[in-house]
């Protein structure tokens, strides 16, 4: 009896030790165990019908005008605004103009123009926007200095070669002593590669990468033709078109006398 009772006590003690050690292991391992998610599932949200998409604000078709920003003045100084120019920055306005690009996307262009024509030019480009007329790019000509090379050998040709639409550049008409309408921000060249300057009698085309666009029987995106909606808009505002000139054809060029 006694020995049996003793062995029972030993067995109980051993079991107790095993239980203790088991508890110890469990406590140690608990520290580095990721807590399990709650056993009970969260109640699922009641089904809700997807609300209709909110209407997006209408894309503003009209641009904005400001004075020439100080940062741009320093870029223009000595480039489009040479020393001794008879025009001052206060005569000019900086326009931000929404337009469609050649990928059909709406983007914001920028143009320096005669401040007295700023509102009129914003109205004209609002109408071009509503036509979704594509303009490849539109930035002040000063940003194209780095494109001047042997082929595009002055700033005007460098900008034209990049098909950049622009206005103000204090300069003479190329190859003459006559001051250009561009010198007052009263002329705009639109897609000048797609609408090049041509002298039909000699076959001269500028910019030099625009020969494919000299054939004006084509109707390619961004082209301007006599009587088309872009032409009509400018003519209604009293602008003249270089494509109407006889000996030289400046298809990109509109000017306001
Ligand atoms: Zn021009």
Image (cartoon, rainbow, N blue to C red):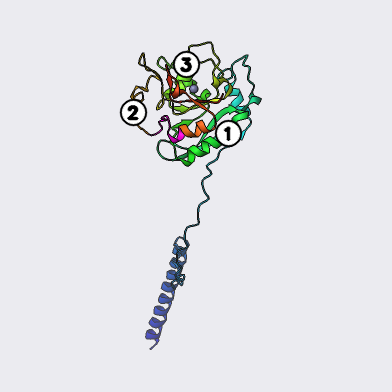
Would residue 65 be seen by someone viewing this image from the given angle?
A: yes
- Please identify the quarter of the rendering in which residue 50 is found: bottom left
Residue under circle 3?
154
Where residue 221 sits in the image (x, y, percent)? 38, 34
- Please identify the quarter of the rendering in which residue 21 is found: bottom left
- Which mark is first along the chain, 3 or 2? 3
47, above or below 215, in the image = below
- Which mark is first along the chain, 2 or 1? 1
Would residue 68 be seen by someone viewing this image from the given angle?
A: no
112, above or below 180, in the image = below
Q: Are marks 2 and 3 in contact (CB under 8 Å)?
A: no
Whether the residue carrying mark 2 lies under 8 Å from ligand 1 is answered with no
Q: Magenta stretch: dominant SS?
A: loop
> Going by the picture, which residue comes out furthest to the right?
90
At numbered mark 3, what does the secondary structure look like: helix, strand or loop? Answer: loop
At numbered mark 2, what does the secondary structure look like: helix, strand or loop? Answer: loop
Q: CA distance from mark 3 to mark 1?
A: 29 Å
Q: Are marks 3 and 1 in contact (CB under 8 Å)?
A: no
Residue under circle 1?
120
Per the rendering, the mark at residue 217 is: 2
137, above or below 77, in the image = below
From the viewer's side, name the closer residue of 34 and 124: 124
At numbered mark 1, what does the secondary structure look like: helix, strand or loop? Answer: helix
Q: CA distance from mark 2 to mark 3?
A: 29 Å
Q: CA distance from mark 1 to mark 2?
A: 31 Å
- Tell me if mark 1 has few (under 14), some (14-19) or many (20+) residues whose alpha carbon lies within 10 angstroms of its own: few
Q: Which residues are magenta?
A: 221-230
Where residue 114 sits in the image (x, y, percent)? 60, 27
Total labels drawn: 3
Frontmost of labels 3 and 1 is 1
């Amino acid at each position: 009896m006694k020995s049996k009772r003793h062995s029972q006590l030993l067995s109980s003690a051993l079991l107790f030790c095993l239980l203790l050690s088991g508890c110890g292991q469990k406590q140690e391992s608990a520290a580095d165990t990721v807590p399990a998610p709650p056993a009970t599932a969260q109640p699922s949200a009641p089904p809700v019908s997807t609300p209709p998409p909110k209407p997006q604000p209408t894309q503003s078709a009209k641009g904005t005008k400001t004075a020439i920003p100080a940062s741009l003045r320093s870029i223009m100084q000595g480039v489009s605004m040479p020393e001794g120019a008879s025009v001052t920055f206060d005569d000019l306005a900086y326009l931000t103009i929404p337009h469609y690009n050649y990928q059909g996307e709406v983007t914001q262009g920028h143009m320096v123009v005669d401040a007295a024509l700023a509102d009129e030019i914003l109205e004209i480009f609002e109408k071009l926007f509503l036509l979704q007329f594509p303009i490849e790019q539109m930035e002040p000509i000063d940003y194209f200095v780095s494109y001047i090379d042997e082929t595009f050998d002055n700033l005007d040709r460098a900008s034209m070669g990049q098909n950049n639409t622009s206005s103000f550049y204090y300069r003479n008409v190329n190859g003459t002593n006559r001051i250009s309408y561009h010198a007052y921000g009263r002329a705009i060249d639109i897609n000048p590669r797609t609408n090049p300057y041509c002298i039909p009698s000699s076959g001269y085309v500028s910019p030099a990468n625009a020969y494919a666009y000299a054939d004006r029987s084509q109707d390619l995106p961004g082209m301007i033709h006599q009587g088309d909606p872009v032409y009509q808009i400018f003519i209604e505002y009293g602008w003249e078109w270089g494509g109407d000139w006889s000996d030289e054809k400046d298809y990109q060029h509109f000017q306001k006398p």
